Amino acid sequence: MDVLEEALVGVEPHAQHAGVRLESKTTKAAVDVEAGELLLQVLTNLLLNAIGVTPRGATVSLVADVDPRGVLVSVQDAGPGIPPLERGKLFVRGQTSRDGGAGIGLAHAMTLVEEEGGVLDVAPFTPGTGACFQLVWPTVSATSAETPHTVRPPTLDELTMVVLDDDLALVELLDTFLTSRGATVRACRTQAELSSILGGGVDVALIDASPFNGDLPGALSKLKRQHPKTDFILISGADPGPAVTGLGVTWVGKPFDVHEIVDVVRALRGSSRTGT
């Protein structure tokens, strides 16, 4: 499976839930790309945004072809489009036109693209046609003696996860990153919402300390008793000490690299399956 197909497969559950069709058209030359993990992150973000603004029954399309600068990937939605006055805000952190969006997704995507020497832009506004994001990504050198291979990121296929944090930017970043690896992610901001989601069955819970406002060890102890099959990860800037870690709760200190979260989750789930 190439990275373009992998991105489509990863967002398919979200498209089905939203009642949105996905279609793609690619050429073989368009899949020989560098930094496949980073490209997967960017494509996942663009596709999730497109699904989020597309009405039920409509289509989001991904088209990829060769370009003199690399591979040209276009993601077309069926939403309201982006008027000229809004274009300047698209890639600014903290700016968003999507309900519930924190504005970090496109800003993060732009950073990744620029660091890899690519280009990310949106096509000129045309009323009634939705928005079309256009991504140019570098190709593997044609003079390379080795057959190019896309580096596959660690996957979290079929895991159900919940993120409890009042930092919407962090929540959206984790949602995009973990979803791109196959996880199903739900977000919440209060203890009551967390309890409701956990009641439906969750593999991993990522929990910030601030929403608990008090007896964190007591609250986590209760959650561990009520949901013994869930692995709990505390994401907090302060070391919670043995009162929390002694409960079998893993601590990941803020700020963290999102790859660290994936490594911790995979390690925990491996231990859960083996009973160690």
Image: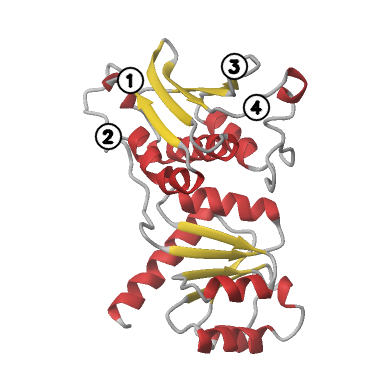
Q: Which numbered mark, 3 or 1, is in the foreground of this view?
A: 3
Residue 242 visible, this orientation: no
Amino acid at dot 4 = Pro
Picture quadrant of residue 189: bottom right
Which label number is shown at residue 80?
4
Q: Which numbered mark, 3 or 4, is in the foreground of this view?
A: 4
Percent coordinates x, y for residue 216 in the rendering: 68, 83
Q: Earlier in the sequence, mark 3 or mark 4?
A: 4
Contact between marks 4 and 2 (CB within 8 A): the answer is no
Residue occupying image coordinates x 50% and y 29%: 116
In the image as oriented, which residue stretches furthest toward the top?
A: 68
Q: Earlier in the sequence, mark 3 or mark 1?
A: 3
Rounded to the nearest angstrom, the CA distance separating label 3 from label 4 is 14 Å
Amino acid at dot 1 = Ser
Rounded to the nearest angstrom, the CA distance separating label 2 from label 1 is 12 Å
Percent coordinates x, y for residue 156 in the rendering: 38, 58
Q: Earlier in the sequence, mark 4 or mark 2?
A: 4
**What residue did someone put label 1 on?**
141
- The total number of labels drawn is 4
Rounded to the nearest angstrom, the CA distance separating label 3 from label 2 is 30 Å
Which label number is shown at residue 123?
3
Q: Quadrant of the N terminus?
A: top left
Which label number is shown at residue 149?
2
